[in-house]
Amino acid sequence: MAGHLKKQLKDAVKVIGSGSLLFASYLTAVGDERFYADQLMPSLQRIVGAETAHVLAVKMIGLGLVPLNRYQDPASLEVNVLGLKFKNPIGIAAGFDKHGEAVDGLYKVGFGFVEVGTITPKPQEGNPKPRVFRLAPDHAIINRRYGFNSCGLAEAEQRLGARRDFQQEHREAGLPLGINLGKNKLSQDAGADYLQGVRVLGPLADYLVVNVSSPNTPGLRDLQGKAELRRLLRTVLKERDALQRERKLPVLVKIAPDLTPQDKRDIADVVTELGVDGLMVSNTTVSRPETLQHSNKSEVGGLSGQPLKDLSTRTVREMYNLTKGKVLIVGIGGVASGQDAMDKIRAGASLVQLYTAFTYQGPPVVTKIKRELEQLLKEQGFSGVSEAVGADHRGADK
């Protein structure tokens, strides 16, 4: 009798275990938002290191192993800027797909645009490991000295060139591709590095980003100075104009959130004067809010995620004011919900990007943000994203 009861108990455990596994597999496949955010992602983070998890995520998404995405982007989320159509304003920020290995999988997740890089002329390993640290209680990451680890222009050109026809189809469908360019760590001529990037990858991009704001490459942020930035952008734009393209390739500049008021005025003056197409606001911050809880808060490097949100949104608002709303802004930093996206849009961003929330909540966060943003637009009386851009500056009672 006891033996029979023991066998029944074992069978019951097997059935329950199998059922639980099947149910978890189902929730994973269908992209259940709560399951990913509350169960799956925290469990994976406990057993897999930050950089290893990043590499694995890129590989899996590159293979198309992503949850089902049944959400259909409504017309209210469509944005037409830079001479391009964006099915929705939610993009993946540079730094996730550094080498252009997962572009099509990221579109499959539901992003309205993908930005790859930062890509440097020559391949470089970046800085010594460990160099990425999670601050889970703070929903943040410190990227300590990643240092533009890059496959280099030649490999990126080969990989992205192989899918050129696919990208043309994506672009026509409202899914543009951005390429983020940087300089090699040991380069003595930053201008030449960026020019080479424009020349090689410009023909494969729907827009280019000149990254002068990573805190992990020595001397890079010095390029945000007025004279240095004017000199660099003038040569980059000249090289851009020499590309044989049907339409002029948009060039944007990615700036830091850790800028003085004078720095911001200088950048606004330069981009307005030279006709730069847009600003990416912003990169990670070297500041450390007192609210940070995790012991990793003392690590050196760029902080991203929720603690960056308010600082980056303020910077969006300030740059929109300084450029009088005439320069397109992409808002980046701490976007993890539809409200976060809406805050940046109302502050002056036409598009937004995320990265850290993607690592904490998984692919379903993209649909969650889009669905919440769609609802917020309706509630606040906006027919679409474009109507909401800069609303806070208009004193709108919406």
Image (cartoon, grey):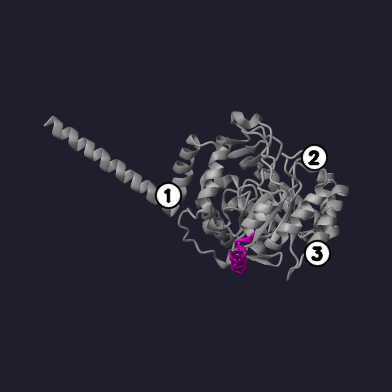
Q: Quadrant of residue 39?
A: top left
* Residue under the point 30% across and 44% down: 18
Q: Give the structural element (helix, strand or loop) at label 3.
A: helix
Q: Give the structural element (helix, strand or loop) at label 1.
A: helix
Residue 219 got which mark? 2
* Residue under the point 77% across and 64% down: 243
- What amino acid is at disc 1? Thr
**Whole-percent x and y of residue 98?**
63, 48
- What amino acid is at disc 2? Gly
* Residue under the point 14% across and 30% down: 2
Q: Quadrant of the C terminus?
A: bottom right
Q: Earlier in the sequence, mark 1 or mark 3?
A: 1
User: Is label 1 or label 2 in front?
Assistant: 2
Is residue 126 part of the magenta span, yes or no?
Answer: no
Q: Earlier in the sequence, mark 1 or mark 2?
A: 1
The residue where tag 1 is placed is 28
Q: CA distance from mark 1 to mark 2?
A: 43 Å
Q: Is residue 156 above or below residue 387?
A: above
Q: Quadrant of residue 252?
A: bottom right
Stretch in magenta: 161-175
**Whole-percent x and y of residue 294?**
59, 31
- Does the residue at mark 1 contact the one at mark 3 (Cβ under 8 Å)? no
Toward the viewer: 119 or 112? 119
Q: Earlier in the sequence, mark 3 or mark 2?
A: 2
